[in-house]
Image: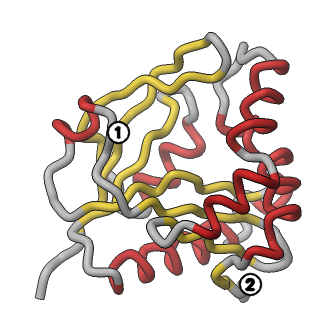
Amino acid sequence: MSVTVRKAVAADAPALHDLAAATFALACPPGTIQRDIDAFVGTQLSVGRFGEYLANPDREVLIAGDFLGYTMLVYEEPKDADVATALTARPTVELSKCYVVADQHGGGVGSALMAATLDSARRRGVAAVWLGVNQENGRANRFYEKHGFHIVGTKRFLVGDQEHDDYTRERRFERD
């Protein structure tokens, strides 16, 4: 399957919000309260927030196909002390979002999106990419492992009032 990946533009904010609303819960562990998921999507993944993300030069959003998935890279030093301590390479970039609609899982969309995302990060000259992923999300952890992300630590992720345990994973780039 050939998947086109492109950089998002401001006009994509509404469709990105809809995509986030359809995919965010897929990353949450069992037992996450739906109203907390909805509140997170409504605040952190709203149309307005996507507009802010897309206007920020330290963020890059990539879209796979006709809104089949998206990633967001954040080119900033980690604010979480546990993450900052665990990472092994600098400069680094956070892969803050990596989501694919459920009916496309296993069909190559995620791999194409990840390849384009890593290529973009590499072109910006970082030494590594890091991410947080819920420890109970076996599917996502297998995907990230397959794409060279190794566990380097742990962190907490808040959805509503619920704290979730995440792995901090890092993928270093080989230097020539």
Total tally of numbered discs in the picture = 2
Instruction: Using the image, determine if residue 93 lies above or below residue 10.
Output: above
Q: Residue at x 39, y 75 (%)?
A: 121
Q: What residue is shown with label 1?
A: 168
**Dot 2 surroundings within 10 Å: few (below 14), some, or many (20 or more)?**
few
Q: Where is residue 16, by image quadrant?
A: bottom right
How far is the residue under mark 2 from the one under mark 1?
A: 30 Å
| SS at circle 1 | strand
Q: Residue at x 67, y 18 (%)?
A: 160
Depth check: give the residue in front, 142 or 24: 24
Q: Residue at x 83, y 20 (%)?
A: 34
Quadrant containing the C terminus in the rendered view: bottom left
Q: Residue at x 25, y 31 (%)?
A: 81
Q: Where is residue 51, by image quadrant?
A: bottom right
Colouring used for the render: secondary structure
Q: Position of residue 9 (x, y in %)?
A: 72, 79
Q: Earlier in the sequence, mark 2 or mark 1?
A: 2
Specify the label residue 1 is tagged with. 2
Q: From the image, state whether disc 2 or disc 1 is nearer to you.
A: 1
Instruction: Using the image, determine if residue 158 lies above or below residue 60.
Output: above
Q: Position of residue 12 (x, y in %)?
A: 81, 72
| SS at circle 2 | loop
Depth check: give the residue in front, 8 or 154: 8
Instruction: Using the image, determine if residue 128 lies above or below residue 47.
Output: below
In the rendered view, does 154 fall on the left or right side of 45?
left
Amino acid type indicated by mark 1? Thr
Amino acid type indicated by mark 2? Met
